Image (cartoon, rainbow, N blue to C red):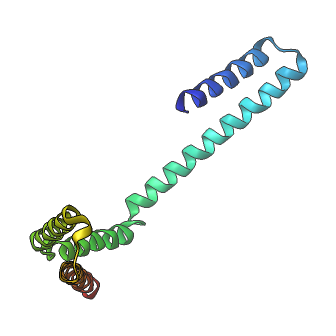
Amino acid sequence: MKSLIKIAILALLLILGYNYFLGNDQEKEQAEKIVDKVKALGSEIKTLVVSEKNKFDEGKYDNTINKFTELIASVKEKISNIDYDNLESKKTELEKSIQKLKEKGQELNQEDTSKLENEMESLFKELEQVIEKIDKK
């Protein structure tokens, strides 16, 4: 896709250059208008960039950057309080239980399914508690 865009831009530049230097009067006039508009656009972009750089230097974005930094710090703090090892061990236990049930196949009884449901419910409750802790902080 990038190559196609590059080829299209190159083709447009070649056509513009051809019309600017070797085209008939109408093509030359049209090419000159396009070149003038591109020059004006470049000048406006330069003015915008210089203006925004000056505003940045004056501190226009300081408040926004500070808020974003505080948000990142807050998220890092909330994430650091999660007991990943405990959640991971429960997940592993649940996966083992599911694998055992798969191996049994048709031989599932009420006790096995109840045990699996209890383990899954326990894991979901613990995940809910973790999410609530994150939301509270």
Tell me the residue at 63%/28% (across/down): 9
Image spot of residue 105 (x, y percent): 24, 65
In the rendered image, which quarter is residue 77 located in?
A: bottom left
As drawn, which residue projects farthest toward the top? 22
**Above or below, comparing residue 75 to residue 117 in the picture:** above
In the rendered image, which quarter is residue 39 located in?
A: top right
Image spot of residue 55 (x, y percent): 45, 60
Is 119 placed left or right of 46 in the picture? Answer: left
Tell me the residue at 23%/83% (across/down): 110
Q: Which of 30 and 43 is in front in this view?
A: 30
Looking at the rendered image, the quarter that the C terminus falls into is: bottom left
Tell me the residue at 33%/73% (across/down): 67
**Above or below, comparing residue 56 to residue 119 in the picture:** above
Tell me the residue at 83%/28% (across/down): 30
Q: Nearer the viewer, residue 28 or 53?
A: 28
In the rendered image, which quarter is residue 111 located in?
A: bottom left
Image spot of residue 102 (x, y percent): 23, 63
